[in-house]
Image (cartoon, rainbow, N blue to C red):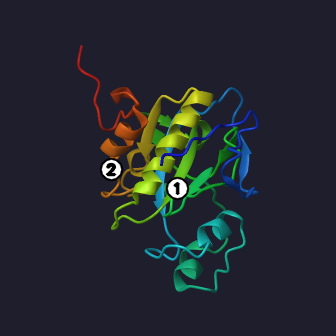
Amino acid sequence: MKPSFIVAADGWVAAARQFPSPNFEARPAGAVPTLIVVHNISLPPGEFGGGAIADLFLNRLDCDAHPYYASHLRGVRVSAHFVILRDGALEQFVSCNERAWHAGASSFFGRERCNDFSIGIELEGSDTTAFEPAQYLTLAALSQALAAHYPIDALAGHSDIAPGRKTDPGPHFDWARLQRETSFPDQYFPYRHRPTAR
Ligand SMILES: [Zn+2]
């Protein structure tokens, strides 16, 4: 069954498991979230479960526990607003009112610093694995809740706003399914639906 979420005035979703991360800052003056950025992540890469994503976002990942952590993640300070686990469970790390650190160097149709004006959602997954139906249901419901609270008018993949540098959410992410489950119009998916020429 599709869940239903509400974003409170403080930018937190009460129904999410909340793990406040120190990795955030204020959005620039006047910046409000207008973009949802979809990512995938798994730690170690390709392995699901175990809680290492939360540990990373809370700066408590044991980087000696896996060679990938030691070579890629030591000293890294990152966060996303949300993580959706394989079973569809929703975790929140940063208030949507604040600027999380998920997109890095990025450009949305020429507008840079996407973290300033976006909400980052990580799906537990990889570029080589299909996502779970429960993850689409949670993502769709969350996207609808975010669009009801903020002037969201577009969704993009990390690879759309950081091409050549990022590949997530990857070829298995089904944008048509997300659009169907959100009922968002075509213009919310500007990387999939080009505006008709006029
Ligand atoms: Zn990403």
Write down the residue under mark 2: 174
- For label 2, the SS is loop
Residue that sits furthest to the left in the current view: 197
Assess whether mark 2 and mark 1 are in contact (beta carbons under 8 angstroms): no
Residue 171: name its quadrant. bottom left
- Find residue 3 and report its horizontal and vertical position in percent: 54, 46
Q: Is residue 76 visible?
A: no
Q: Is mark 1 within 8 Å of ligand 1?
A: yes
Write down the residue under mark 1: 122
- Find residue 155 and report its horizontal and vertical position in percent: 44, 38
In the rendered view, would you say 160 is above or below 50?
A: above
Residue positioned 72% across, 36% down in the render: 8
Q: Is residue 191 visible?
A: yes
Residue 63: name its quadrant. bottom right
Q: Quadrant of the C terminus?
A: top left
Residue that sits furthest to the front in the current view: 1
Residue closer to the observer: 53 or 134? 134
- Find residue 150 and report its horizontal and vertical position in percent: 60, 29
Residue positioned 53% across, 30% down in the render: 152
Q: Amino acid at mark 2?
A: Asp
Residue positioned 74% across, 33% down in the render: 9
In the rendered view, would you say 84 is above or below 195?
A: below
Earlier residue among tags 1 and 2? 1
- Left or right: where 61 falls relative to 43: right
Tell me the number on the disc at residue 81. none
- Left or right: where 36 falls relative to 182: right
Q: Amino acid at mark 1?
A: Glu
Residue positioned 65% across, 49% down in the render: 100
